[in-house]
Amino acid sequence: MTRAVIAAIGEDRPGLVNDLAKLAHDLKLSIEDSRMSVLGGEFAVLMSISGGGLALARLEEKLAQLAEANGLAYLFRGTSDREGVEGCLPYTVNVTAMDHPGIVHAVASFFSSRDINIHSLDTVTERAPHTGTPIFSLAMEVEIPSTVRIAELRDAFFYFCDDRDLDAEFRPA
C-alpha cells in the first residue's frame, strides 16, 4: 500500500487541520489531495495521502488515537492510483435555483443515466439579499466520454434544466 484515503468528521474547533497535517508530516507522508469544510457545526475532511506502506500503517494507528482523543469519527482506506479516464473530456457544470429537495438527485441522475462520471461536486445554500430566499448552487466537474456528442448533451441538459426551473452553465473545464 502506498496510498490511502482518510475521512474524518467531528465538532469544529481550531487546530484539527493542524493535527491531521502533523500526523502526515511526522510520518513523512504526503497529503496529495484534500477537501475540508465546515458543515453545520461539524468539520469534515477527506484526504488522499501517499508514502511508504509502514508509514501508512502507522498513520492508521495514530489516526485512531487522534479520533478517540478528539471525538472524531473516521475512516482509513488503502487505495491505489486512479486508473486513467482516457478519452474523457472534463466539463464544468453549474446549477443555481431556489432551494428545494431533489436538485442534486435530479442533476446526478441526468448524468448517471448517460454513463457520465461525476468527478467532483460541491453545493451550498445561501440566503438571497433583501428577500432571504434560500438559493441553492451546485458546481461539479464531469468526465464526458469522447463518444458522446457534446452539442446534443448540452441541448438535452439545458432542456432538462429549463423543465425544472434551474439556471445552468455547461462548459469545458
Image (tube, rainbow, N blue to C red):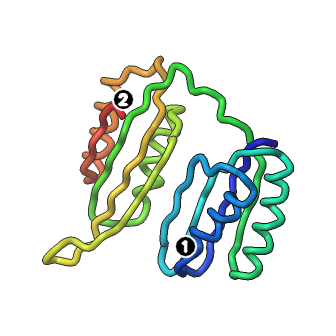
Q: Measured from the top left, where is residue 165 in percent x and y? A: 25, 53
Q: Position of residue 118 (x, y in %)?
A: 50, 41
Q: Identify which residue is drawn at 37% across, 50% down.
A: 139
* Frontmost residue, 74 versus 69: 69
Q: Nearer the viewer, residue 112 or 81?
A: 81
| 144 to the left or right of 23 | left
Q: Residues within 10 Å of mark 2 (few under 14, many from 20)?
A: some
What label does residue 155 carry, if any?
none
Q: CA distance from mark 2 to mark 1?
A: 36 Å
Q: Amino acid at mark 1?
A: Phe
What residue is at 79 percent from the left and 70 percent from the top? 64
- Which sits earlier in the primary sequence, circle 2 or circle 1? 1
Q: Nearer the viewer, residue 22 or 76?
A: 22
Q: How many marks?
A: 2
Q: Is residue 76 left or right of residue 12?
A: right
For residue 161, side relative to residue 65 (left or right): left
The picture places residue 75, in percent across and down from the top left corner, at 73, 62
Q: In this rendering, is residue 121 above or below 141? A: below
Instruction: Name the residue tied to disc 1.
Output: 43
Task: Mark 1: give few (<14), some (14-19) or many (20+) Cα within 10 Å.
Answer: some
Where does the N terminus fall, quadrant-wise? top right
Label 1 SS: strand
Q: Which residue is mark 2?
A: 153
Work out whether 17 lies above or below 25. below
Amino acid type, mark 2: Leu
Q: Secondary structure at mark 2?
A: helix
Identify the residue shown where x is 64% and y is 71%.
19
Q: Is residue 8 above or below residue 58?
A: below
